[in-house]
Each structure stands twice: as C-alpha cells, then as structure tokens.
Image (cartoon, rainbow, N blue to C red):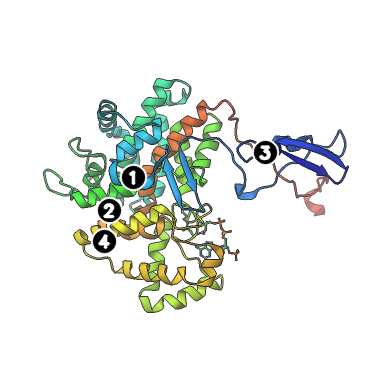
C-alpha cells in the first residue's frame, strides 16, 4: 500500500518534496516550500476560474458532475423535489437536518412573519425609473436593507445571524415582486400570511382587484419545485462571491447583494433569460439546423447548455423537463417548448456537443415554465435569486463557523512592466 503523499521533484534544483494528500487534494501552501534559493517566493498554483481549486470544505451540497448527481445534505435532489415543501428544503439546507414538525412550524411562522418590508424601502424602490431592470432593483434593494438593520454587522452574534437569515429569506420574494410591480406601474400587493411562501409570492406578483388571491395549486407546486432545485449548487460563481464578500466580514445583506450581482451575469443565472431570447430568435423548428451551425462555428452559444461541473445531464433539468407538461395542462402549451425539445434532441446527437460533453443545464427548461406561468423574461434571474438566497446564507454561515477560512485574497502572476519612471506630460 502506497503512502498518501505526493512527491514532487523540482527539476530546477533536483530537490524532492513530499506533500500530504487529504481528500484527494494537496494544500496549495505546501508548494511554497519549493524554492530555487532561500529568497525565492516559492511555487504558487495558477488556476484562472478556479477550475481545479477547492476553496473550502462544505457539508451542504454534493455534486458528482460526471454521473449527474446532486444531493442536499446527503438527500438526492429528486427525493427532496418530490416530497418536501420549499421551506422544508430550505430548513434542511440551512441547518443540515430535515425539521421535526415542531421545528418546521416555528420556521414557517418565523419566515411568514418577516415578509413585510419597511415602508421606507418601498419608497426607495419607487425611486427607480419605470423601466429599470428588476434584477438591478433587486440587487440594490437587498443592499439597501443593510442600512435598515445595522445590527446585521454583528456577524458573530448568533441571535443576529438567525434574525437576518429569516429576514432575508422572508423579504426577498417581497422585494422581487415589488420590483416587478414597479416595472409594470402596478400598485404593490402586500404579503398575505394565509398563503404558503410560494403562494404568497404569486399573490404579490399577480393579485389585481380580487379581495383574496387564490394561487392555482399546480402552478404553486411547479414554482415550489423550481425553487427547491435552485436553492444551492455548491461553490458556483455567485456562492463564491458570497463567501468572498463574507470573508471580509461584511454584513449578510451586502454579501447577498454582491452574490446576486454575480448571478445576474448571462453565463450564470442570467442564462435562462438568454435561453428564452434564443428560442424566440430561432422562431421555429425548421430553423434549428441553421442555428446549430452558428453554434458549431463559434458564432453563437447554445444557451442553457453546458456546465462547468456537469459533464452529464443536469439532474435539475431532467426534473423540470418532466413536470413541464403538468404545468402546460393548466397554462396551455408554450410553443417554445417544441423548439426546445427538438433543439435538445438534435444537439445531443451532434458531434460538437458529444465531444465537449455539453448537456442541458437547469436553465434550459426553467424559463419556458416561468413564461407559461406569466413571469416576464426580465424577472427570470430574480426568480433564481429568491431560492438561491437560502444557499448563499447557508454557505455564508458555514464559512463563518469554519476556523480554516481567511479573507479571500488570491495571488496573481504580475505580467506588467518592471519598474519605470514618471515622464512629464510634455515629454510623452
Ligand atoms: N454552446 C456552445 N459551445 C459551448 C457551450 C454552449 N452553451 N458551452 C461550452 N461550449 C464549448 C466551448 O466553446 C468550449 O469549446 P472549445 O473547447 O472548442 O473551446 C468547450 O465547450 C468548453 O467550454 P468552456 O466555456 O471552457 O466551459 P466552462 O466550464 O468555462 O463554461 C458555461 C461553462 C459558462 C456554463 C458554458 O457552458 C456556457 O457558457 N453555457 C451557456 C450559458 C449557460 O447556460 N449558463 C448557465 C449555467 S448553469 C447556471 O449558472 C445555473
């Protein structure tokens, strides 16, 4: 039986070094002992985009990208999506165990009773232009909440951490729905405590003149499943941002705002919006081959395809695709679904995609369902940010408890000029 170490021979000096291997990793800091002379800084690893760098230990989410497996706290995502309510899944991700009935009821009560936002926040929201993108409103309003709750800066006060966690989870749907109503010029619809977390969101989005909004149970459950699937996905770009901002001990409101800003990018959470635009642009099944040619020649990307971690079918995409038909029985069929199904089928049989292991990701089908439910395209990333707030907070809390975590501060390879001297303007 060999040893759990890695032997590195530095061919510059002929010296040999031994680094322990733990959990399939070596410590980057172990490379620093490798020097050509005592003044040398030592070797660093270079990894743009963190493609092969573990930045933390985590007990929250497990992904096996090669096999297409996703688990929250050990439970397969398929079982959670089928059996749990949204807040039950959120509790599991946050605290590590499924709640008992008593814990669950307290959790639901606490979240339900924090859904209102301060009226000043509502007037703050009124200040945005009528056509402001809801994701911009969402990011700014979440950041603004930091000014309403200054005690949130006490990030090592457990009571405060609990309170801010509940406030954030409770208030993000309110902010999201208000952002939408603002962009439509509609009166804000206030939270209704009789409804579920998801049902209340639909109420705040779509209530018009009726005295009491009654969500359609199929749509409510569809949205609940979509949100469960989006709660956490380990160290993705926005979660890494959350941890990086949190590592400087900033408060959770600004950290969530920063994470949401990362999520808004088209290569991350902005992709579902782009998928819809792409499907509309393709327009009909007949135009698919021409679009695929553009993708294969590098002129376009097939949005909703490909993933840094999944080199197999994204399990979330499979769940969404399967229940899309249930939703369409209620809403009527979205014609874009035919294009999406055919596009997926063709792409999966094309050499270009097979060779690169490109499969549909969670965003490929989620946008089509959101559209069928009546959510405008500009709201799609906000719809992602609501459930991911739970994941961000769970990851942030885990980081604060981790004695190994330090302020995030990567190194660089300096590629610029060596020292040079200032030249007065008239001599340049
Ligand atoms: N369409 C066409 N080609 C693609 C796609 C795509 N969607 N995704 C990857 N490729 C190609 C790349 O061009 C590259 O080809 P090459 O080797 O010939 O240069 C190869 O596949 C590897 O791609 P990378 O960009 O190096 O992979 P990376 O892991 O950096 O990117 C990403 C992953 C950003 C998700 C990428 O697949 C992508 O842009 N997909 C479309 C956007 C999208 O759907 N994002 C949502 C991701 S899921 C989420 O955030 C919730």
Rounded to the nearest whole Å, what is the CA distance between mark 1 and mark 3? 34 Å
14 relative to 425 in the view: left or right: right
Proximity of marks 4 and 1: CB atoms separated by less than 8 Å? no
Rounded to the nearest whole Å, what is the CA distance between mark 2 and mark 4? 29 Å
217 relative to 129 in the view: left or right: left
Q: Earlier in the sequence, mark 1 or mark 2?
A: 1
Rounded to the nearest whole Å, what is the CA distance between mark 3 and mark 4? 47 Å
Q: What residue is shown with label 4? A: 325
Where 401 sits versus 70, above or below? above
Picture coordinates of residue 151 (x, y %)?
A: 42, 23
The quarter of the displayed image where residue 340 is located: bottom left
- Residue at the extreme left: 211
Q: Residue at x 28, y 49 (%)?
A: 223
Q: Residues within 10 Å of mark 4 (few under 14, many from 20)?
A: some
Rounded to the nearest whole Å, what is the CA distance between mark 2 and mark 3? 53 Å
Closest to the observer, 267 or 19: 19
């Amino acid at each position: 039986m060999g040893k759990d170490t890695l032997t590195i021979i530095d061919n510059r000096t002929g010296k040999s070094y031994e680094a322990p291997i733990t959990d399939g990793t070596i410590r980057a800091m172990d490379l620093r002992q490798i020097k050509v002379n005592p003044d040398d800084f030592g070797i660093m690893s270079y990894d743009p985009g963190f493609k092969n760098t573990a930045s933390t230990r985590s007990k929250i989410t497990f992904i096996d990208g090669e096999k297409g497996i996703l688990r929250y706290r050990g439970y397969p995502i398929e079982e959670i999506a089928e059996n749990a309510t949204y807040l039950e899944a959120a509790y599991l991700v946050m605290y590590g165990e499924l709640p008992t009935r008593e814990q669950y009821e307290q959790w639901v009560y606490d979240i339900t009773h924090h859904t209102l936002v301060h009226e000043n926040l509502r007037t703050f929201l009124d200040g945005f232009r009528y056509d402001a993108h809801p994701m911009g409103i969402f990011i700014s309003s979440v950041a603004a909440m930091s000014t309403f709750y200054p005690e949130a800066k006490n990030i090592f006060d457990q009571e405060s951490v609990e309170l801010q966690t509940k406030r954030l989870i409770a208030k993000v749907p309110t902010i999201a729905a208000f952002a939408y109503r603002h962009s439509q010029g509609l009166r804000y619809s206030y939270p209704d405590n009789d409804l579920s977390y998801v049902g209340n969101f639909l109420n705040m989005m779509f209530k018009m003149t009726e005295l009491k909004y009654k969500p359609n149970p199929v749509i409510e459950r569809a949205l609940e499943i979509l949100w469960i699937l989006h709660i956490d996905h380990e160290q993705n770009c926005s979660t890494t941002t959350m941890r990086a901002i949190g590592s400087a001990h900033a408060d959770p409101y600004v950290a969530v705002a920063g994470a949401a800003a990362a999520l808004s990018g088209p290569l991350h959470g902005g992709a579902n919006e782009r998928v819809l635009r792409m499907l509309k642009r393709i327009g009909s099944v007949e135009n698919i081959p021409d679009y695929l040619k553009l993708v294969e020649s590098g002129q376009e990307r097939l949005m909703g395809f490909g993933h840094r971690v999944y080199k197999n079918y994204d399990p979330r995409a499979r769940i969404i695709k399967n229940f899309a038909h249930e939703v369409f029985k209620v809403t009527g069929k979205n014609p874009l679904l035919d294009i999406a199904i055919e596009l997926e089928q063709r792409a999966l049989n094309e050499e270009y995609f097979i060779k690169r292991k490109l499969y549909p990701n969670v965003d490929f089908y989620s946008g089509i369902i959101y559209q069928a439910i009546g959510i405008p395209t500009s709201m799609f990333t906000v719809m992602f940010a609501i459930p991911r707030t739970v994941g961000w907070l769970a990851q942030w809390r885990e980081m604060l408890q981790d004695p190994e975590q330090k302020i995030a501060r990567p190194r660089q390879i300096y590629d610029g000029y060596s020292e040079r001297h200032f030249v007065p303007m008239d001599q340049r």
